[in-house]
Image (cartoon, rainbow, N blue to C red):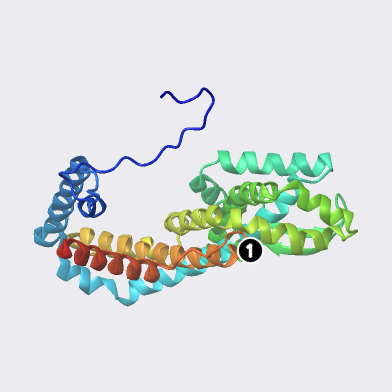
Amino acid sequence: MSEPSGAAVSLTEAPPPPDVPSKQLTAQRVVPLRRPGRWIATAVVLVLAAQFVHGLVSNPFYQWDRFGYWFLRPAILDGLLITLEVAAYSAVLGLLGGILLALARLSRSPVLRAVSWTYVWALRSTPLIVVLLFLYNFSALYQTLSVGVPFGPAFFTFDESRLATDMVVAVVGLSLNEAAYAAEVVRGGILSVDQGQHEAASALGLPKGYQFRRIVWPQALRSITPNYVNQLIGLIKSTSLVFYVSLLDLFGAAQTMGSTYPGDIVPLLLVVTVWYLILTSVVSVVQFYVERHYARGATRSLPPTPLRRLRDGVAGLRARIRRDAAV
């Protein structure tokens, strides 16, 4: 007898074939998709890395014994200290200058906006070595510097040759250059804050300074931190140019020692490379924890630390080995 039209039809799961037990169907193991391309690429990278390390260790041209001799020599450490001083002063002054330039660029005053834009355009268009050499020869243009009434009498007069020491020239040159790039980083961070935050703060009647310090700036730092740390790493490497204004930084000390000991040029360059790697690695670690600090409230959970990632990776590898061994 046929089923009447419009009647509901009950769909039930079809029974398993009589020759296949139901327990066998539920115990099937899911086999992951094979990816031979990834394994081949991994093997190629490992082989190339092994060849590179073998070349570093076995090639006598690198002179690793001389590298160990120079690595902690007083001349190198003195140059490293100068590099740290120049980088620290320039980073602080450059960031402060960048904040002022960014605020001027976002100001409603057309004069401030024009001056800020012109400064950023000029300094970003001029090579850093040109800025340093120009400041180094600044005394040829102005022998004295004075403070007083514009177009009138001077209250204080300074001898530019005494004031502009090699350290001052290096710090001022790097700070001026760094401020131009930091201004764009800070401006981008401030613009990344949602406009609703500004409107809500204004609706509450909060003063502009309080809005910037407690609402806008903490949120902008999430965007500013990674970009400015990238600039800071570039600043650390840019300190090698102060050698051309007669300041013996890390690179300058290695160059001087290389002139005295021409057979140790390669080990000295390796010493400089390793020290720069150490400095930039420390800055990168600081960057991670600063970003993690300002990520509070923006993400549901804080990003794991590198040690935590290593532990999770080892635990996952062990669990996978046990699972494969059990099968």
Q: Nearer the viewer, residue 145 or 255?
A: 255
Judge from the rendering whether residue 84 lies leftward or rightward of residue 197; answer left or right: left
Whether residue 75 is visible to the viewer of this picture, yes or no, is yes
Left or right: 146 with respect to 276?
right
> Going 12% across and 55% down the picture, which residue do you hit?
55
Percent from the top left, x then y, of residue 15?
A: 28, 43
The percent coordinates of residue 10 (x first, y second) are 45, 37
Q: Residue furthest front?
A: 1
Residue 182 at x, y percent in the picture: 61, 52
Between 294 and 88, the one lying in front of the other is 294
Q: Residue at x 41, y 62 (%)?
A: 280
Q: Is residue 248 left or right of residue 228?
A: left
Secondary structure beneath label 1: loop
Which one is in front, 42 or 112?
42
Q: Quadrant of residue 27?
A: bottom left
Query: Residue farthest to the right?
Result: 205
Q: Residue at x 69, y 46 (%)?
A: 191
Q: Which image quarter: residue 79?
A: bottom left
Give the crowd class for mark 1: few <14, some 14-19, many >=20 residues within 10 Å: few
Find residue 169 and report its horizontal and vertical position in percent. 56, 59
**Number of residue marks:** 1
Asked if one can make out residue 143 in the rendered structure from this viewpoint, the answer is no
Q: Quick check: 143 above or below 11?
A: below
The quarter of the picture where the N terminus appears is top left
Answer above or below: position of 78 versus 44. below
Which amino acid type is shown beneath numbered disc 1?
Answer: Gly
Residue underneath mark 1: 297
Q: Splitting the image into 4 quarters, where does residue 60 fall? A: bottom left
Q: Quadrant of the C terminus?
A: bottom left
Residue drawn at 52 percent across, 53 percent down? 231
Q: Is residue 116 above or below residue 75?
A: above
Q: Nearer the viewer, residue 94 or 224?
A: 224
